[in-house]
């Protein structure tokens, strides 16, 4: 599977985006509120369809990203892999004793179906599959 994006938890998307834009030359390709995840997000990349950075800013104090920021501060939150058959991949992981956190794929940013794998199943990294 190819890496679709790397998620980074930040306190302020606008502040963090400045670094990626001004120092690394990336451009914002997409912005979205994801109320179900209690975050707003911005994707940045080179505009060539390659791997992107997803900045995640909490919109509430009780979401997964707010909890992560409170415990660890800003930093890498998850790695997302592109899955061309997300339902089959989820079933395979379940059978292998690494069930995704979600029973079935659910709507995520940019209109994709997504699921997450607990960091305990992925050597300390939260993994997202993007269908
Ligand atoms: N990366 C690595 N480890 C993480 C982590 C992360 N993002 N978030 C939590 N952990 C670690 C904690 O540090 C803790 O480790 P220790 O046991 O060693 O102390 C452990 O996981 C805690 O696990 P938990 O008690 O089961 O769960 P939490 O309440 O901390 O929640 C998680 C963690 C992954 C289950 C929860 O954040 C989750 O369900 N995430 C999936 C959804 C999500 O992250 N949405 C936001 C992104 C949305 C988007 O991209 O659009």
Image (tube, rainbow, N blue to C red):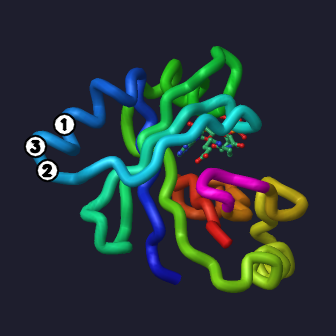
Q: In this view, does 82 lie above or below 104?
A: below
Q: Is residue 50 above or below residue 72?
A: below
Give 27 or 2, whichever is nearer the viewer. Answer: 27
The residue stretch that appears in magenta: 107-111
Disc with the residue nearer the chain's start (2 vs 1): 1
Q: Which residue is drawn at 70% across and 61% down?
A: 114
Q: Which mark is residue 19?
A: 1
Query: At which x and y percent is residue 122?
Result: 58, 63
Query: What residue would you read off at disc 3?
Result: 23
Considering every residue shown, the one lying at the far top of the view is 61
Q: Residue at x 35, y 73 (%)?
A: 50
Query: What residue would you read off at disc 2?
Result: 24
The answer to whether the residues at label 2 and label 1 have Cβ atoms under 8 Å apart is: yes
Q: Which residue is drawn at 65% across and 18% down?
A: 60
Residues packed near mark 3 inside 10 Å, few (<14), some (14 to 19) or many (20 plus):
few
| Residue 90 horizontal side relative to residue 120, left or right | right
| Residue 30 horizontal side relative to residue 40, left or right | left
């Amino acid at each position: 599977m190819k890496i679709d994006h790397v998620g980074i938890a930040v306190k302020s998307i606008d502040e963090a985006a400045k670094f990626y834009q001004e120092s690394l030359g990336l451009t914002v390709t997409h912005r979205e509120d994801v109320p179900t995840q209690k975050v707003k997000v911005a994707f940045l990349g080179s505009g060539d369809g390659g791997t992107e950075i997803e900045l995640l800013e909490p919109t509430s104090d009780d979401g997964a990203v707010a909890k992560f920021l409170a415990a660890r501060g800003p930093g890498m939150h998850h790695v997302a892999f592109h899955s061309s058959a997300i339902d089959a991949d989820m079933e395979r992981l379940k059978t292998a004793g690494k069930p995704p956190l979600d029973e079935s794929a659910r709507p995520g940013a940019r209109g994709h179906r997504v699921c997450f794998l607990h960091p305990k199943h992925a050597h300390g990294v939260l993994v997202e599959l993007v269908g």
